[in-house]
Image: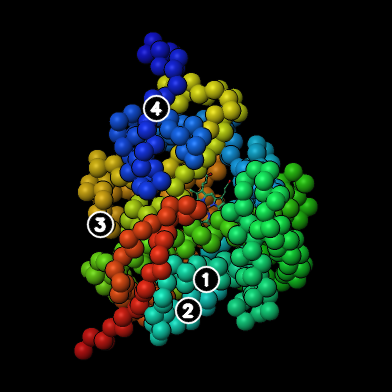
Amino acid sequence: MSERTTAAAAGLPPRHPEKGFAADPLDVLQEGHRVHGPVFRMPVDGVETVLVGTWGGLGELFAAERDHLEVLNTPLVHDLFGRALFNLTADAHGQARQRLRLALSGRALPGYVPALLEVAEPVAARWARRGTSDLHREVRELTGAMSARVLLGIAEDEADAARFAADFETFVAAGSAPPGTSRFTSPRYWAGRAARRRLRALFARRAAAVRGKPDGSALATLVAAFDGAPTAVGPLEDHLLALLIAARETTASLVTWYLVELAGHDDPARAAAQEVLAVPAEPELLVRRDALPVLRAVLAETQRLHSPNLLSVRETVCPVTLGGHLIPPGSRVAYSPSAGHFDPEVFPQPRDFRPGRFLAGQTNTSRLWAFGGGAHACLGRPLAELMTLTAVTAALRQGLPRLPAGPPSRIRYRPAKAPIDPLPFTLECQEPAS
Ligand code: HEM
């Protein structure tokens, strides 16, 4: 260890004031990193937290993660999700990831394209006919239906669709019950626990039905992957709850901001609308990384400017050195996926929406962290990007996005970045070129 590192390791990271965090957390994090570098301390939700960010800081955090840090989930999250992936540690976590990946990797995606288009196209046609009174609410419904279809094989006209939607809503609402022991006095918590039981029964019934009878969803692969799995890797039903929750809000956030940005930027919107004309004849373009360059550049720029997740939180299980500071066990550590997304040296004019920076030969998407990194990096990235491109393609085939009342003026950052107020949205049908 160098002399400088030894000296620095003697002290905790510098402290940054939390002032303004509730209103504009990204600005506060960015300022913290500008002043203090990759690691600093700040209270988050009243708890002292070591914040790690920037390219170098994240690399160091992810390298140390396996043996030194665990995901910090509240007792409420443990109750609701049981032994779902993000509640597992060490080997059990690694093994469960391997099994889930079989159904979520890029290789599995082409099989999901027809089902996803079948869900998205009628919804986008309805948006074009009627407009929507709230873009984010409608997009949440769409990503909910897409997730149900692709992860569970539930089509919208099945009786299970309404049952699943109602119980899942109640389950999600339980996530805002108090996180500690006072959850036991919350009716929302108990309603969520009852919904969890019904959802797990529904998953088990559908898993039994899909055995040996693939239905274009991920379920058959998942059932085969968890058949005979050791108890430690957790039951498939718990993992399905985690996948559904991970898929829905975050993807809804990304689709919402994608459409918001296109509504405000006519040139990329028109270029993207031109590109989607090829998709009906060749739907596999949606999963080819070398296809649809404008749509993919807008996807990358939307991830950069509007990362759905604000913070991923860990707890140190033994001492760890980050940025030259020795962090004791039991400390809260968090990283913001987008803390480095506004670095002007990597992304010139970082506040501007400039999808062109991601077109061939320009900025590399490897500096984007919207899907996290390290041991708990998002397993659903390929599927999330496919769902987003499918939703946007379906919308652009109907018309160009418009926001009659203008862009969102108030934003919330948790659980996923979204407009606070209803956001009127229409798709403006284009005259065919003569
Ligand atoms: C735009 C959409 C999405 C975004 C931005 C996103 C982002 C993230 C991030 C940042 C993490 C890391 C959290 C951490 O470090 O603690 C994560 C984890 C995870 N995501 Fe996603 N996600 C998205 C969609 C999905 C989808 C569609 C699925 C699956 C169907 C999924 C499944 C998961 C799972 C299972 C984990 C936990 C991994 C683990 O603990 O090992 N995500 N996601």
Badge 3 amino acid? Arg
Q: How is the image coloured?
A: rainbow
Q: Which residue is mark 4?
A: 15
3D distance between C-alphas at marks 3 and 1 = 29 Å
Q: Mark 3 near mark 2, Cβ–Cβ under 8 Å?
A: no
Residue 61 or residue 196, whichever sits in front: 196
Q: Secondary structure beneath disc 1?
A: helix
Q: Quadrant of residue 285?
A: bottom left
Q: Mark 2 near mark 1, Cβ–Cβ under 8 Å?
A: yes
Q: Residue furthest bottom?
A: 434
Q: Give the residue at x 30% y 45%.
A: 342
Q: Which residue is mark 3?
A: 354
Badge 2 amino acid? Val
3D distance between C-alphas at marks 1 and 4 = 41 Å
Residue 141, label in figure: 1
Q: Give the residue at x 52% y 45%.
A: 377
Q: Is residue 142 left or right of residue 364?
A: right
Q: Mark 2 near mark 4, Cβ–Cβ under 8 Å?
A: no
Badge 1 amino acid? Glu
Q: Quadrant of residue 158?
A: bottom right
3D distance between C-alphas at marks 4 and 3 = 34 Å
Q: Which residue is mark 2?
A: 123
Q: Position of residue 241 (x, y in %)?
A: 65, 58
Q: Give the residue at x 51% y 34%.
A: 47
Q: Secondary structure beneath disc 2?
A: helix
Dot 4 or dot 3, earlier in sequence: 4
* Residue count near mark 2 (Cα–Cα under 10 Å), binned few <14, some 14–19, many ≥20: some
